[in-house]
Amino acid sequence: MRLPRPVSSVTVPLMVILLLALPVWYAVGPGTSGRTAAPRPVDRSTVAQSLEHLTTVPRRIHVLGYSRDHFGGWAQQWWKDPGGDPDGHTGAQCSTRHVVMLHTFDVRSPGDEGSCPTPVGLITDVYTGEPLSPDDVEIDHVVPLSAAWDHGAWAWNRAERVSFANDLDVNLLAVASAVNQAKSDAGLGEWLPPTAEAGSPSEAGCAYAARYLAVCLRYELTVSDDDAATARQSCGM
């Protein structure tokens, strides 16, 4: 699924930087050292460039009319079997949620051709640094749907909102159910991963801020003064 919204040309180099950097954090997480490890230069750069181009507003104003239904449910997307046909013809139609799981965990092939595989194994949760199994997962929208609504998505059409809610590139992470529920619809200025040190620079906090702001930039969402301040603090800027 690709975005129906136009993306400003200024976001292209930032997306390249971010997508090159994300697999490391996404695959292994910040670990228990995330609170004390220094922010990565690539994340600091992404935050600095994002803040230069994002529109900042004094505070998040809750816009009336929000409903999760406005963003639709999980769409069906093509999962390409990495061990199959190099042309991408081997795979299955799976829900976006399932595809995120398959990108995150090991994959057990299904018995029936064309069926969605099963995610298996353990990973390190990118938010907590703790072991995580597929049985204890929820899919987190890095920029929550409610926050996106308040910062500009209220003006989008339904197709644009559905695309945002199903964006596999930057806005979806498989995380522990408890931490996803604790985050709820909080924006960057309201919540940081447990592995981050609020108010202090950290690898985990800066990586999260970089991803959050890159999503906002890609979709031309505004950010609050608190969001921007938290990003700077998390990256030691």
Image: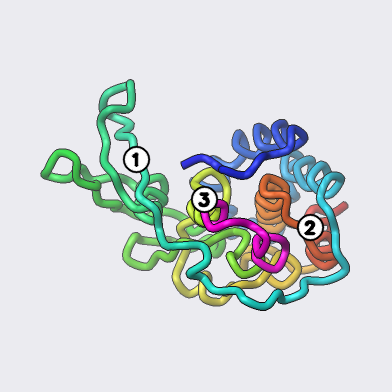
Q: Residues within 10 Å of mark 3 (few under 14, many from 20)?
A: some
Sequence-wise, the earlier of marks 2 and 1 is 1
Q: Label 3 sits on what residue type?
A: Ser
x and y percent of residue 235 in the render? 79, 53
67 relative to 211, above or below:
below
- What secondary structure is the magenta-colored segment mainly? helix
Disc on the earlier residue, 3 or 1: 1
Residue 181 located left or right of residue 122: right
> 37 and 135: which one is in front?
135
- In the image: residue 190, left or right of residue 225: left
Residue 46 figure quarter: top right
Foreground label between 2 and 1: 1
User: What SS does tag 3 mark?
Assistant: helix
Residue highlighted by disc 3:
163
- Give the residue at x 51% y 70%: 68
Classify mark 2: helix, strand or loop: helix
Q: Disc 2 designates what residue?
A: 231
Task: Verify whether residue 77 appears in magenta.
Answer: no
Dot 1 amino acid type: Trp
Find out whether the residues at labels 3 and 1 contact each other: C-beta distance under 8 Å: no
Which of the labelled discs sits on residue 18, or is there none?
A: none
Would you say 225 lies left or right of 167 here?
right
Is 140 or 94 nearer to us in this picture?
A: 94
Spatial CA distance of label 2 from label 1 is: 34 Å
Closer to the eye: label 3 or 2: 3
Q: Nearer the viewer, mark 3 or mark 1?
A: 3
What residue is pinned by disc 1? Answer: 78
Q: Position of residue 129 (x, y in %)?
A: 53, 60
Give the residue at the far top of this rendering.
87
Estimate the x, y position of residue 157 in percent, counting from the top left. Answer: 58, 56
